[in-house]
Image: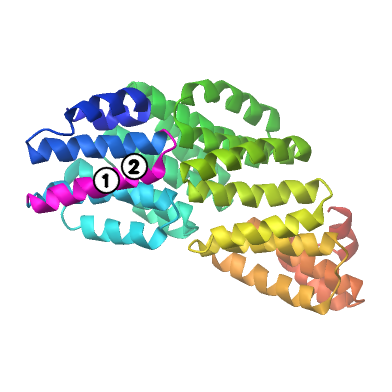
Amino acid sequence: MSDLLARAAADPRGAYATASALRNTGDPGQRVLALRALGLADKELGRLGEGIAHLREALDVAESARLDYAAAQVRMNLVGLLATGGDIEGALAAADAAAPVLTGADADRLRANRAYLLARSGRIREVARIARTCADPEVLVGLRINTGLAKAYAGRLGGGEADLRAALAVAERTGLRHQAAMVRHNLAFVAMRRGDLPRALALYDAVEPALVGAEERLCQLRIDRAEALIAARLPGEARVVLADTLERSTAGGYRCDTADALLLLAHAELADGDPGAAAATARRAQAEFADRTGFALLAGQVGLRARWAAGDRSASLLAAAERAAERLAGHGWASAAADARTLAGLVALAHGDQEHAERLLHRVGGGTVSARVAGL
C-alpha cells in the first residue's frame, strides 16, 4: 500500500481511486496512509483545499491512535501543500514539528520539502545548505530540483543546471519518469534564463504531455512558458497564457502559483506597453506574496518600472528604487537589484544629477551613463 504515495504524483487519478477504497479500514495506520495518498493526489488534481483537509484528517487519526511517527509523516506532507497554498508560517511549523521525529528516507524527504518551502518563500540562500546525499532516489531528485532552482533564481545558472542534470541522471537511472519530466521542465527554465529561448520553448512543448493530469505541475510549466514568451518579445501571447493559468491556479487553490502568475502578468503587461495595468497587477501580486517577502520585493520592482514607463521621474521614485535595490540584493536577487539600481540611475540622470547616476550605474557593472543607457 505504501506505493500509493509514489503513485499520487505520477498517477494521481489512479492513486485517488485506490486510496478512496481503502480509507475506511479499521486499521488506523492504514487509514492514515490512505488519507495521505488522497491528500497528495488532490494537490496534483487541482483540489488543494481538499488535499489539506485529507491530511488534517490523517493527522487527527494518527494523533488519536498515538501513532507519533505516522503523525510526523503527515506533517512532512503538509509542508508542501501548505506552502503551495501560501501558508508559509504553517508550513514552517509543520516542518519544525516533524523534524525531531523522522529518520532515514523520511528525514531526507522532509529536507526536500523544506527546500521547496524556502525556495517558494524567496529564502533562496538557505536552500543550498539543505543539500545532502540521500539514499532514496526519489527524494534525492526532489532535493536536487529545489537546490538547482534556488541557484538559478540567484543567477548561478551553471550550478543550478549541474544540480538539475544530476537529478535527471538519477531519475532516468531509476526509472522515475514523472520526476524526469519535472527535471526537464526546470532545465527549460534554466535555458530560458540563459537566453536560449528556442531550446526552452521546445523543452516546454516536449514536457507538457508528460504532465497532463497533474494540474499544479501544468500551472507551473505554463507560468514558466509565459516567462519565455516575454523574453522572446511576445508579451501578448504571454498575457493569454497567464490569464488562463490564473483561472486554473485560483480554482485549484494554488496561491503560490497564483502569485507567481500575477508577477509575470505584470511583466507581460509592462512589456506590452500597458504600464497602468502592470502597476495594478504588481500590487495584486504584492498582496498575494504577503508571506513571501523576497518575491513581494520582485513585485514591487515591477511596480517601480511601471511608474517609470508611465512617465514618473519623481524624487520619490528615485528613493524607492534605491531602497528596492538594497533590499533585493539582501534577499539574493542580484539581477533584480541591478535593474533597480539602473532605474534609480536613470531617474537621477533625468534630474540632471550625473554624478549620482554614475555611482549607481557603476554598481550595476561599471561603464559610463551613456553606455549604460544605450544598453537598455
Near-viewer residue (371 or 168): 168
Amino acid type, callout 2 = Gly
Residue 98, located in which quarter of the rendered image?
A: bottom left
Q: Quadrant of residue 329?
A: bottom right
* Secondary structure category for the residue under label 2: helix
- The residue under the point 72% across, 62% down is 303
Magenta segment includes 53: yes
Q: Nearer the viewer, residue 250 or 302?
A: 250
Identify the residue at image location x=84%, y=67%.
346
Query: Relative to 36, is 281 above or below?
Result: below
On screen, residue 1 above or below 160? above
251 left or right of 133 in image: right
Q: Which mark is residue 55?
A: 1
Question: Gap between marks 2 and 1, in whole Å?
Answer: 6 Å
In magenta, the rendered stretch is 45-65
> Does residue 96 appear in the picture of this structure?
yes
Tag 2 near tag 1, CB within 8 Å: yes
**Figure quadrant of the N terminus:** top left
